[in-house]
Each structure stands twice: as C-alpha cells, then as structure tokens.
Amino acid sequence: MKQIKVDLPFIEPPEWALLERQLIDLMNEAVDPLIERYIHPDGRIKWPPTDDHVGIDALDDAYESFFNWPLFYVIGGHEKFRELSLKEYEAVTKQFAGYDSGTGHRMVEKEYEQGYDWFHQGEGYTFFYHMALMDPSHEVNKARAIRYAGFFLNEDPEAINFDEEHYIIPYPHSGSKGATDRNFIQHFVKWSYLDWMRYYGLQFQDVPGVNTIEDLKEDDNALSMGAAIIERMSKGDVPLNLLATTMVANAYLHTGEVKYKVWLKSYVDAWIKRTQMNNGIVPDNIGLNGIVGEHNGGKWYGGWYGWTWPHGWVSIGQGVSVAAENALLLDGNPDYLEFLRSQIVALDDRAVESAGTRFVPHKHGDKGWYGYHVEGGDELCEDYSLEAATKGQNKNVLWKDGWFEFRPIEAFYPTHLWYMSMEDSDKTILNRLRNYSDPDWEHIRFRKTKDQGGHDYAWVSYLEGNYVNYPVEMLKFNISQVYQRLDFMKMDTQDPADYKDDYLQIRNPITVEGLLQLTLGAPSPLYNGGLLMARLRYYDADSKRPGLPSDVAALVEELESESTIVRLVNLHPTKSRRVILQAGAFGEHQFTSVQYTVRGAASQSSSFNLGGSTTTEKLPSGIQQPVVGTQIQQIDDNWLLVELEPGCHTKLNLATKRFANDPSYKTPWSEEDRT
C-alpha cells in the first residue's frame, strides 16, 4: 500500500474541521438517552404495544429506526454503534418473528420479511446493507445476505420469487414465503377510508360509486374499490421490485459470485427493454405472462405503487435509480444510467414552466376526480396557481394529457444522476430542474424528510464553488438537529401506549447527510434501498476499523470525473494519526496518482501554492507560515495510507479512475499481504 507522510502545520484549525469533530463527538453521546428511554434492554422496540399484533406492515419502520447508525460508524462514529447496530437487527428480527401477518405466516419467516412490497422492504433493509459496510466479516450477516438474495434466485423451493421465463418478479409482494397475492386477498378486500388516503387520490377513476375519496366511507364502495385493487394490482411485476436488485448486489459484494451479477443485469435489462417498447416511459404493471397492462385493461399505468397511486415518480424513481446505480456498480457500464436519465428527461419534456421553474408531472392517470389534498403545497392546481387544496381553496390539481401532480422534481434524482455519471450534460439537467421560484441551493433550510436530509442542490452548489460556506453552515445545522432531537426527548411526555410504528424514527438523534457529503464526497443513499455511492472511504490504520481516526477531519472540496480533491486535518496537538483512504465505497474506483501539499522552509511572509493559485499571507510578528510545496506520487491502487503529524493538514488531489475495479466489501485487511 502506497504511503505518504504529512507534516504541514496549520496556523489555526479550520472551522469546518472543529465542527466536524464536534458533531461526531456530540452524536456519540446523544444516542444514549434514546437507548435508555425508548428501547428495551434486550433491544426490542416499544411498538407494537401488545404482543398479539397482527399485520403485514411496520417491520420496515422498526429497521428504519436505526438505518443510519452503521453509516455513522463507517464515517467514524464510536465503536458502540457497531455493537448497537448488530444488537438491534437481531432483536427486531426476532421480535417481529413473533407477530402474525394474518396470511398463515409470521411477519418474519426465515429471518426475513414473509412478503411485502419493495417500497417498504427497501426502506427497511437499507439498515442491513449498511451493516455490511460496517462489518463485512460478520459471518452470520454474510450468511443471511447470501440466503436473502437466494430467495430471489429461487434457491429456496419455499420462496419462489422470480419467473425465469419472463424475467419478472411476478407479484408486487415478495419475500421469504415467495411472491404471491396473499396479502392483497387477506387485507385489501375492503378499501375503507382512512385519513392518510386523502393525500394521494384514487387508484382508479372507473370504480362504480367511487367518485371521490369520501365515497370510500361507504362499505359497498370500499368493497368495490378493494375488488378492483385485487383484480388489477395484486398480480404482476412493478418498477418497485427493481429495489430487490440491491439485495442481490449485496450478496455479490460479499462473495463476488457471478450468478448474482447475471441475475441483476438480466432483470434490469428486461425492464429497460420494456421501457423502450413503451415509448420511453417505464410501464408500471407487467402481467404474469410478461405483458404490459395484462391485468389492467392494457394500460401501462395503474399498477401497485405505480404512476397513478400513491406516490407516482417518487416511488417509481427509487426503483429506476437504484437499479441503474446497482447495474453500473457491478458491471462498470455507464450506459445503465440512461435508464434513469431517460425518465427524468421524459418528465422534463412534459413539464409546465412557471416563474422560471420546471414543474414536472409526477403521476399519470385517467381523467376524473383530482380534488384530493396534496401534502407538499408546491403542486400546480388546475388554474396553474400554487394555492394547494390544503389551504382551503378547493381546487383540483392540474391534470394535463393524462399527467398530473406537476411540481419541482426531488433534488436527489438529478443529483444522483450527475454524481454517478459526472457528465456536463447531466449537470445541465440538474441546474435546469432547480426550483428557481424558491431557491434551495443558496442556504440551508429545514426539510421534513425521513433521513433528515434534502440538501443535495446546496451541496452541488458548494462543489461548483458557488456556496463556499456550505461546510460550516451545514455542520452547524446538523449540530442543531441533534440538539433539537435531544430537547424533544427531554420534554417528551407521550405515553408509550400511544407510540406509533415510527416513534423511534422521529427521535433518532443521528444525522449523517452532511458528514456523507463532506467527508466521503457522497450523496445520501437513495432512501428506499440504495447502496452508499461514495468517492472515498476511510479506515483507521491503527485501530483497524472503518472510519476516520479520532481527531481527524476530512473535507471533499472538488469532484471531477477523473479527480477527487480532499483536505485532511489532524487536530491532535501531540499525536500522529494514520488514515487509509479507499477509492469508492466498495473499492470500485482506482487511485492512479496523488498530488499533496507538504512543508517547506519557514518564513514570516510566504508565498505558497494550493491547487494552482498563488497566495501571499502577511502574518503577525512572531508567527511563521511555512512555505507550502507539492509532491506527486503514482499509486495504481484503491488504497492510500496517509500519516498526519500532530496539528498538521494537507490537500490531496487524487487522480481517480472511476468504476475501474470489481466492487466488494474487502477491507485493507482482507488480504494477508496488506499491512
């Protein structure tokens, strides 16, 4: 492993570095009140309130409560987060194996979801994927990863989840007891009104007696809608099932066995072909015989978690994006990104522009009733105003040529596209789709998201050199998020008997978006089941564990297609720190050379070069600024060992060949010749 030594002292520690370490130290302590008050000593969570719970939902919410703990450990969080993550996965899995799904199976069978849609499975099993980054040597979880993926390769005769003739996962619900329609038949016979339904509209506009959401309050109408859902939505493949590619990719990263790559590529290729044959729009329901719209009157839209209901592009985009990223990761072929790019462009082509902002359609459905209440408040109404129905205006959302819910696209889709491709044309798409009527890339704002994120555009603006204070402002914001969660817990008077399945999620004090962006040069993983896509990873060379060593801070300043610029700081006054940099979250990239700053002769007035620009600093008498020079070393490896002397820093310009290596969970200590 190539090694370099850094001896360039800083005159004063960078503010961002101090804040970064403050945030890490804060979260190391902030988790303790959550554990002590809201989790049983054996790791079981305090929902559901009774042991006789029956249902198919909420395993995902239980796992989600801890989804970012392994990521925090991977960045440099305390060692306890490794133990806590392993403990909670075991405890939750065992806990939910004790609940009846109402379908003849327990909620968890063979340590896995008995069967559910991948919108929820994707959310929940993200926790499991991140644990492999945290500890790939854990034999039990590695065995689980292989067994879980085997469910989708039909390696378990009791869990047939893939039709090898038509290249489909033949039902929207799949799992350890196979893909079937049993959940629909058991639980969705009557689609009775619940308050949450008023935010998403109707699945179909042609069900007799059901003209508005309110009509579902009548039993006969609820039965009619339930019958239509079972008839049209319960069978066949849907884009959300593409999220299963992460479970298969996870097994590949553990083993390198080619069968996983073959399955993943074949399944994604089949969806790409269907999309091309459907005039470039991904269809949302594929029948049991592989025919688009087979169980839905020939319509390419109207599937479960599809274009019409409930989230439209928000959920379809997760499947498409994750599949494109996984295929690129395993195959190294950037052409797979066209799957995602084509859908974003197709929506943009149908956009309505208002106040300089592209309002893209998120849903497609038949003409009918569209007077439901939208949550966001940034959807165009039928008169092209932004006066949402929730404000008492009683206006329908805009429906145009079958497309509806026109609003600015979520930032993470174009951000992930550009991040994965590094193409200027994709940066143009990203900039084009920003919300120019309400800019969110010039300052930090609070967003209501499950991962406490949503600052993708601001991060990209920083990387472009337009938001130079982003690191400091983002880290201060993250620190405030933690303190607010701590205060919420301190003032919390809610009776545990009234907890909902997300009670832990809204109290979890761990927030990692800023640390991912600034230290790893990575966007937050796509929430419904995306892997961590990162330019860098770190290992503590002395402790032989993932993450930044104590006292070390990192800031990725620039990302280009063939280069990565990162600044490293050792804040300890007397002890050196050794950190290993890895090219990519899974070693999928390759370092080819490194140019780094080193110490020269001391002078009170010095001229030095950092990244090509010459700066002259006048310092107070008695304070000496060392002359800064540069050194270049060839690497040709996906690891680099950097020794940082006490109170020193450096700027690394790492020439990087992206997607050059076979990805895996190997660590610097996976091979005997690595030291």
Image: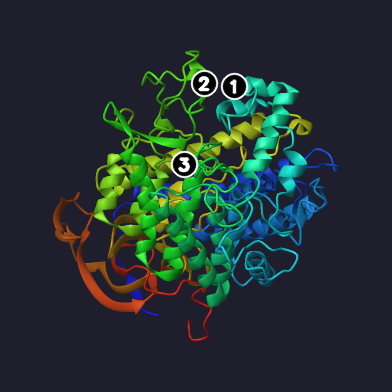
Depicted 13 relative to depicted 311: above or below: below
> Residue 523: where, in percent of width, then height?
42, 51
Q: Tags 1 and 2 in contact by the CB under 8 Å rule?
A: yes
Circle 2 — which element?
loop
**From the viewer's perspective, is the residue at label 3 or at label 1 nearer?**
1
Q: Identify the residue position indicated by label 2 in the image.
A: 371
Identity of the residue furthest to the front in this view: 297
> Residue 387: where, in percent of width, then height?
42, 18
Circle 3 — which element?
helix
Q: What's under tag 1, amino acid-wise?
A: Thr
In the displayed structure image, the side of residue 665 where residue 46 appears, left or right: right
Q: What's under tag 3, amino acid-wise?
A: Trp
Q: How many marks?
A: 3
Nearer the N terminus, badge 2 or badge 3? 3
Q: Identify the residue position indicated by label 3 in the image.
A: 313
**Residue that appears at 31% across and 68% down:** 7
Depicted 596 relative to depicted 339: above or below: below
Depicted 397 relative to depicted 138: above or below: above
Q: What's under tag 2, amino acid-wise?
A: Gly
Q: Residues within 10 Å of mark 3 (few under 14, many from 20)?
A: many
